[in-house]
């Protein structure tokens, strides 16, 4: 019997978990202070994390910008970090702008805070900054912008350098938070010198309203670890560590943040990147072989990292018909754009 290929979710392959289990056992036997209460800022983890990110960043960023080790705080993943930012920084009943399409489960977090949602479309260069700017200049008020700037979920697109720079200027001019979900930033197989500078590079002022959200869930292919981080200016981190949960329980995931500093993440990540790149190449090859003119499925943006490839159907074809034809071998999530259009207020120039 054929194994069903499930393309509905971005779940990593569990075959890499035994390596992590062994590292966990080793650290637990060491009997350090990691299993006790710990301060909200872990300097050892921050130093390791800054060096790790610096090594994986673009060549241009490495040469011009040394990452500040004091700009990090550990979290229990991107979802936790997003909720923490909404609760502590953005607040309830605020207007949150997102990309369309975007990670649809983020909307449940915004709903927890009674947010009003408005959207801006994406194209092959990421969020359409000009449309965002037109709305803002027309008097549309937003309190926060949530986006996935690199290898978007599900679009697969990456925000261009020009748009990153303009986004920072708009955030300062119109005083809104940037909530950057950077889950897929480091799952990148473009040449080192061709990688864009991270979004945090453009938000280097102490007063910037920037929150970079990242996680080891995809980097280690182990979401059950629940380990991530926030990167933000010191003034923002000061507000985050005054959160009641942090004041009561101390730092998030001290055991896991210690574990990660003793694990060969670079080798592990390089193996994942090689595997994912090969998967993408295989899909592209199959598409070219069976649909060489792109008459049935056209790729919006050829992935250079991350988990997702966004395919467009020809006009008049509903994704349900394709799903029905493939139901014995493949399943995928149809109608995501339709769902967004039906349930969200579009943020556009009327």
Image (cartoon, rainbow, N blue to C red):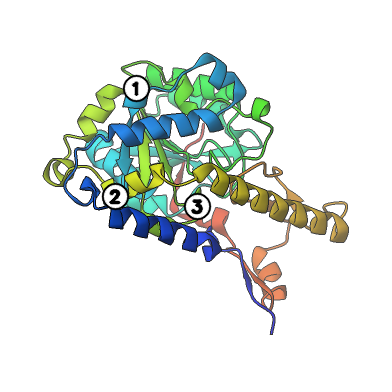
N-terminal label among 3 and 1: 1
Q: Quadrant of residue 56?
A: top right
Evaluate whether residue 174 shows in this view: yes
User: Alpha carbon of mark 3 to alpha carbon of mark 2: how far?
Assistant: 39 Å
Q: Is residue 201 left or right of residue 259?
A: right
Q: Which residue is mark 2?
A: 255
Q: Position of residue 196 (x, y in %)?
A: 60, 27
N-terminal label among 2 and 1: 1
Q: Which residue is mark 1?
A: 175
Q: Position of residue 189 (x, y in %)?
A: 66, 40
N-terminal label among 3 and 2: 2
Evaluate whether residue 115 shows in this view: no
Q: Quadrant of residue 175?
A: top left
- Which numbered mark, 3 or 1, is in the foreground of this view? 1
Between 119 and 206, the residue placed more toward the observer is 206
Q: Position of residue 11 (x, y in %)?
A: 52, 60
- Which numbered mark, 2 or 1, is in the foreground of this view? 2
User: Alpha carbon of mark 3 to alpha carbon of mark 1: how far?
Assistant: 26 Å
Judge the density around disc 3: few (<14), some (14-19), many (≥20) Cα neighbours within 10 Å. some
For the residues labelled 3 and 2, say whether their Cβ atoms are less than 8 Å apart.
Answer: no
Judge the density around disc 1: few (<14), some (14-19), many (≥20) Cα neighbours within 10 Å. some
In this rendering, the answer to whether 310 lies above or below 97 is: below
Describe the element under mark 3 as helix, strand or loop.
helix
Between 146 and 349, the residue placed more toward the observer is 146
For the residues labelled 2 and 1, say whether their Cβ atoms are less than 8 Å apart.
Answer: no
Q: Residue at x 52, y 19 (%)?
A: 165
Q: Which residue is mark 3?
A: 340
Between 22 and 195, the residue placed more toward the observer is 22
């Amino acid at each position: 019997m054929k194994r069903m290929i499930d393309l509905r979710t971005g779940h990593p392959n569990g075959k890499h978990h035994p390596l992590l289990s062994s590292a966990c056992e080793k650290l637990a036997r060491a009997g350090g202070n990691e299993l006790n209460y710990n301060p909200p800022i872990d300097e050892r983890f921050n130093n390791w994390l800054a060096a790790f990110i610096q090594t994986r960043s673009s060549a241009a960023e490495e040469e011009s910008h040394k990452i500040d080790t004091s700009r990090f705080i550990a979290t229990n993943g991107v979802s936790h970090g997003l909720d923490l930012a909404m609760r502590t920084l953005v607040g309830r009943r605020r207007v949150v702008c997102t990309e369309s399409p975007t990670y649809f489960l983020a909307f449940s977090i915004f709903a927890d805070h009674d947010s009003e949602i408005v959207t801006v479309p994406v194209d092959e260069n990421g969020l359409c900054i000009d449309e965002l700017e037109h709305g803002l200049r027309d008097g549309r008020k937003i309190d926060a912008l949530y986006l996935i700037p690199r290898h978007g979920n599900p679009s697969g697109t990456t925000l261009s350098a020009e748009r990153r720079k303009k986004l920072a200027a708009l955030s300062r001019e119109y005083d809104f938070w940037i909530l950057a979900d950077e889950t897929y930033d480091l799952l990148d197989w473009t040449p080192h010198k061709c990688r864009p500078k991270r979004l945090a590079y453009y938000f280097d002022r102490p007063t910037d309203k920037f929150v970079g959200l990242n996680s080891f869930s995809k980097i280690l292919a182990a979401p059950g670890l629940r380990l991530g981080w926030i990167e933000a200016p010191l003034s923002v981190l000061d507000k985050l560590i005054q959160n009641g949960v942090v004041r009561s329980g101390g730092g998030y995931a001290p055991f896991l943040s210690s574990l990660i500093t003793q694990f060969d993440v670079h080798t592990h990540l390089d193996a994942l990147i090689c595997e994912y790149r090969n998967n993408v190449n295989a899909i592209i090859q199959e598409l070219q072989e069976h649909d060489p003119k792109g008459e049935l499925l056209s790729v919006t943006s050829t992935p250079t990292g991350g988990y997702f490839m966004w395919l467009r159907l020809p006009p008049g074809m509903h994704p349900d018909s394709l799903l029905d034809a493939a139901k014995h071998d493949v399943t995928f999530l149809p109608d995501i754009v339709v769902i967004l259009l039906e349930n969200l207020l579009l943020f556009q120039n009327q």
